[in-house]
């Protein structure tokens, strides 16, 4: 609406006639006539001058909407003509109506069209700066909306003014992701203001701390142990949760969250959750408060021994697992543990997940209950009969069975007795006569072997098996067939630094100590014997209880020498007589061959080297006629 249109409207209202019936020129005359009626020309000029003085560029004045178009809004500010405000200065979602009033800023008293250029945004900004300044001076609060994230903090819109909220001033504790606060409308304190630099710094933390101080003072004055109070979970750690109960953060420890087992506090509470908790203890000086959640309900562990006697069965749900067992909740707040050793009679359970699943309902037997320490031991295998008790009756000691070798260890082999039940065949029970260092020397995994049941222990769930017990113990036969002093033939089976092991006819091994291998002193057994040699020995020691037999080559040789002495009459310790002295006079000199001694010829005679008495006579002597005088026979060798 133009200035002329405005005048026309005013004249119409004052005269009560239609503007269409009055010509334009006449309307202006009537308007001027109304203004100057009763006024002198000087007074009229003064009024016009005063009007211009009241409107100065850069002022904020009150205006009224007189017309709204698509691109501009005409506002009457009681100036000689209406002012123009661009439509873009108004939010698109706000409807502007005629007669709406608001403050405007005079940018120019006369624009290109001869009309004042106005700005609502600048007027609002000036007005809001005044409001912010007043809040800063009076330590009052302002409200703003977080619009975006900037370096070091957030940008906040405070009534059209850009303000900065540092990240350290968002809350009393450090915050993580700032983007989650975009769009939040908060109340702040202005902690720094510079109009010249158009700088506004806000703090939400200061306002929160002031409010918390008031709440804290009020809380401490009314707090009592055992009191139920409400709070909000502020933070969660591995050991508990911190709950704001009114200016003070109390600790809700994980052990006080539930009578049952809590793996992590986040399984029970979450950040921002409202809780009603019980005050367990508090210290006014340190402002520390301990809170409890489970204390709001009675302790279900009281009298648990009476509710769950040993041997009774119960049904529960698997709630958690560890490497050593599974926890089963048999009622709210009461959890028992099934150890891995109590899950199966016949299988070795390495992890509870091999048998159970989280959430699975199971029937268990109570093995032990302790209300003082809040523990219950449960068993899963006890629900079914114990096959080990039947096994002892089915396989008495001495029973021979055939089974598959399931596994080999350094100390023995496990042989399947029945499905799920394996017995141990120890390395010491493989052979009576051979030393077995590893079971792989005798059997392999998957072999079918016959073994004898040695013992079954149902309580310890162990079966002892034997392979050598299928045959008679050769050491028992050794006691009957061998005696100390016997001469036997043995085969060298192994050489060691201290002697040689030799195998007897029945397969047992005896030891020939290095000092018994030869008459003379030797450094090592390899100097006189080798593996596989067959030698004659004497049994010098026999202990079947210790399974030891001592052998001696040297002892055997001594016995043979002693036997020869007895055979030829040579007494031990007697005077030594040479062969020449015994038969020297009986052998004629002509009987000796050239270069042969009497001792050598005598030895040859004793060994049968001379064919007959005639051959021993010299050729020059005539044959005997039987008439010669008998000569005295030569003296005999002792022992011959």
Image (cartoon, rainbow, N blue to C red):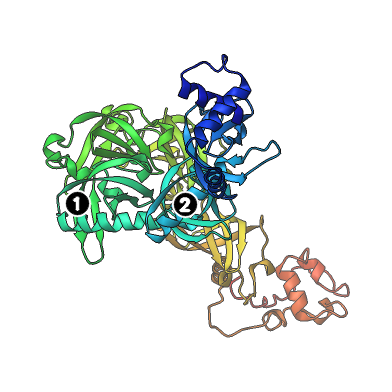
- In the image, is 249 to the left or to the right of 34? left
Residue 619, percent across and down?
88, 72
To which quarter of the image does residue 272 belong?
top left
- In the image, is 205 to the left or to the right of 196? left
Front in this rendered view, residue 314 or 331? 331
Front in this rendered view, residue 433 or 617? 433
Residue 441, percent across and down?
58, 45
Residue 70, visible in the rendered structure: yes
Query: Quick one: label 1 or label 2, which is nearer the N terminus?
Result: 2
* Residue at numbered disc 1: 279
Q: Quadrant of the C terminus?
A: bottom right
Residue 303, percent across and down?
11, 41
Residue occupying the point 80% across, 70% down: 616
Q: Relative to residue 292, is residue 321 depicted above or below? A: above
Q: Relative to residue 391, is residue 291 depicted above or below? A: below
Label 2: how many residues lie within 10 Å, few (<14), some (14-19) or many (20+)? Answer: few
Residue occupying the point 57% across, 50% down: 56
Measure how far apart labels 1 and 2 are at the Cα level: 28 Å
Residue 332, percent across and down?
23, 34
Helix, strand or loop status at disc 2: loop
């Amino acid at each position: 609406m133009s200035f002329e249109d405005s005048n026309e409207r005013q004249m119409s209202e004052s005269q009560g006639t239609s503007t269409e019936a009055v010509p334009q020129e006449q309307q202006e005359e009537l308007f001027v006539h109304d203004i100057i009626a009763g006024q002198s020309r000087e007074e009229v000029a003064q009024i016009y001058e005063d009007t211009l003085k009241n409107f100065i560029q850069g002022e904020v004045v009150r205006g009224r909407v007189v017309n709204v178009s698509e691109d501009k809004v005409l506002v009457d500010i009681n100036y000689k003509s209406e002012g123009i405000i661009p439509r873009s200065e108004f939010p698109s979602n706000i409807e502007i109506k005629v007669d709406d009033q608001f403050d405007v800023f005079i940018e120019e008293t006369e624009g290109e069209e001869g009309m004042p250029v106005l700005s609502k945004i600048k007027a609002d900004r000036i007005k809001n700066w005044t409001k912010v300044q007043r809040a800063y001076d009076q330590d009052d609060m302002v409200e703003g909306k977080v619009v975006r994230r900037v370096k070091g903090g957030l940008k906040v819109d405070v009534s059209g003014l850009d303000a900065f909220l540092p990240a350290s001033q968002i809350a009393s504790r450090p915050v993580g992701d700032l983007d989650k606060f975009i769009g939040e409308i908060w109340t702040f304190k202005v902690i720094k203001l510079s109009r010249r630099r158009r700088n506004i710094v806000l703090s939400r933390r200061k306002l929160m701390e002031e409010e918390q101080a008031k709440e804290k003072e009020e809380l401490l004055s009314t707090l009592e142990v055992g009191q139920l109070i409400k709070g909000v979970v502020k933070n969660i750690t591995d050991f508990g949760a911190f709950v704001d109960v009114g200016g003070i953060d109390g600790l809700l420890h994980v052990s006080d969250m539930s009578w049952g087992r809590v793996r992590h506090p986040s399984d029970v509470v979450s950040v921002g959750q409202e809780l009603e908790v019980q005050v367990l203890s508090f210290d006014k000086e340190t402002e520390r408060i301990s809170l409890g959640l489970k204390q709001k309900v009675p302790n279900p562990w009281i009298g648990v021994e009476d509710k769950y006697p040993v041997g009774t069965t119960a049904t529960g749900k698997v709630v958690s697992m560890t490497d050593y067992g599974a926890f089963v909740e048999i009622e709210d707040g009461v959890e028992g543990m099934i150890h891995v050793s109590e899950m199966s009679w016949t299988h070795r359970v390495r992890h509870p997940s091999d048998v159970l699943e989280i959430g699975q309902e199971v029937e268990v037997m109570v093995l032990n209950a302790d209300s003082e320490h809040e523990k219950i031991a449960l068993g899963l295998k006890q629900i079914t009969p114990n096959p080990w008790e039947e096994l002892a009756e089915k396989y008495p000691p001495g029973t021979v069975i055939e089974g598959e070798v399931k596994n080999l260890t350094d100390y023995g082999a496990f042989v399947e007795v029945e499905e799920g039940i394996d017995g141990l065949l120890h390395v010491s029970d493989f052979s009576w006569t051979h030393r077995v260092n590893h079971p792989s020397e005798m059997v392999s995994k998957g072999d079918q072997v016959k073994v004898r049941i040695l013992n079954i222990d149902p309580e310890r769930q162990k079966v002892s098996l034997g392979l050598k017990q299928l045959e008679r113990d050769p050491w028992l036969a050794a006691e009957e067939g061998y005696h100390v002093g016997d001469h036997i033939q043995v085969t060298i089976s192994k050489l060691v630094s201290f002697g040689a092991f030799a195998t007897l006819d029945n397969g047992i091994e005896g030891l020939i100590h290095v000092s018994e291998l030869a008459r003379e002193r030797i450094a090592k057994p390899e100097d006189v014997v080798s593996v596989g040699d067959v030698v004659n020995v004497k049994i010098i020691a026999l202990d079947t209880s210790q399974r030891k037999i001592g052998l001696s080559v040297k002892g055997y040789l001594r016995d043979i020498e002693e036997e020869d002495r007895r055979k030829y009459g040579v007494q031990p310790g007697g005077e030594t007589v040479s062969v020449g002295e015994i038969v020297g006079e009986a052998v004629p000199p002509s009987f000796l061959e050239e270069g042969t001694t009497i001792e050598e010829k005598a030895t040859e005679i004793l060994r049968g080297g001379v064919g007959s008495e005639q051959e021993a006579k010299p050729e020059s002597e005539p044959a005997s006629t039987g008439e010669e005088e008998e000569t005295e026979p030569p003296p005999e060798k002792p022992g011959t």
